[in-house]
Image (cartoon, rainbow, N blue to C red):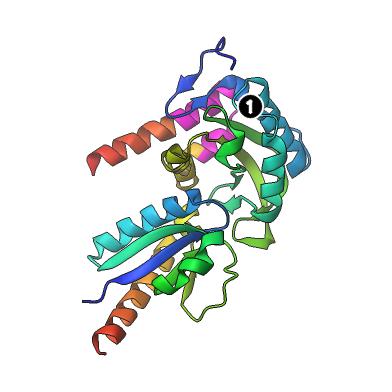
Amino acid sequence: MDTSTKTEEIDFAIDESLILVQDRAKTREEIIKKLGGLLQTKGFVKDSYIQAVLERERTYPTGLQAKVAGVAVPHTDTDHVNHPAIAIATLANPITFHVMGSPEDQVPVEIVIMLAVHDAKLVIPILRKVIFILENDQALLKMKNANSKTAIKQAMLDHIQELKEKEKKK
Amino acid sequence: MYKVRIVVVCGSGVAMAMHAAYKLREHLEKEKLYVHIDGSGNNELASRIDNYDMIVSNAQVTVKTDKPIFNAIPLITGMGEKELVDQIIQKVKEIQTAKNSN
């Protein structure tokens, strides 16, 4: 696994090298391969990961309409992952994904957050942090409008920080 | 008081189901409702469905059932979440009333 770049570690790695800003990908397959490729190059996922994500997306689509943007959260089983990480892409042009739970419906997606979790016990805490961003209009807008990888990464980190503070207050 | 049993189902794997179940639990606890909530993958649902009174799913439920089914997506995106939770609360109370009068 590539440990030469400094990655923020919360429960998972999040790093500029795993982020694409205003990417020009035109199809779901293209963006999934691009993001999966970043995760694979850095050793976070196995060679089987990309194919597994593509297949899963076909039967169990991950498109979701949040209030301020269409978001997709492609992922697959822990078998294909070495170390937990997320890869994020914002898209220059929305790409159509099918909707989670309603495969006949479509949603134009502008933000793709690809998840890689290696340990079944960690799926829930990691996924939760990420999925909660769908309700964080500010964070999604920051990502949508970001023109740098750092800004996108920061939006995610800020969101997670806010979440931690909210949970503490309970 | 009858404990209404709810299963939250995700298309594949339990991850999303657990997140949605967590959120639903929070809502229903605020209402002080007497419920039991489990998360499940779609594949296991067929063998478990008899144990539950209602289903909240983010995928097409392929098991044949007369039990009430709700869409879990609002619990994940937050859009329409309040309306969904209100509907679930209604149904929970209905089921409890029906069971208590037996």
On screen, B25 above or below A144? below
Residue A102, percent across and down?
A: 63, 62
Chain of the residue on which disc 1 is drawn: A
Query: In the image as oriented, which residue stretches furthest toward the bottom?
Result: B102
**Quarter holding residue B52:** bottom left
Nearer to us in this view, A90 or A45: A45
On screen, A55 above or below B33? above
Residue that label 1 marks: A39
- Mark 1 crowdedness (10 Å alpha carbons): few <14, some 14-19, many ≥20: many
Residue A53, percent across and down?
A: 67, 42
- Judged left or right of residue A114, residue A37 is right
Residue at horizontal 72%, vertical 45%? Answer: A95
Residue A92, percent across and down?
A: 71, 36
Residue A30, percent across and down?
A: 77, 37
Asked whether residue A69 is in view, the answer is yes
On screen, B49 above or below A6? below
Residue at horizontal 67%, vertical 48%? Answer: A56
- A127 drawn magenta: no
Please name the amino acid that badge 1 sits on: Leu
Query: In the image as oriented, which residue stretches furthest toward the top?
Result: A4
Asked whether residue A22 is in view, the answer is no
Query: In the image as oriented, which residue stretches furthest toward the front?
Result: B47
- Judged left or right of residue A60, residue A141 is left
**Quarter holding residue A125:** top left
Nearer to us in this view, A78 or A153: A78
Residue at horizontal 47%, vertical 55%? Answer: B17
Q: Which residues are magenta?
A: A140-157
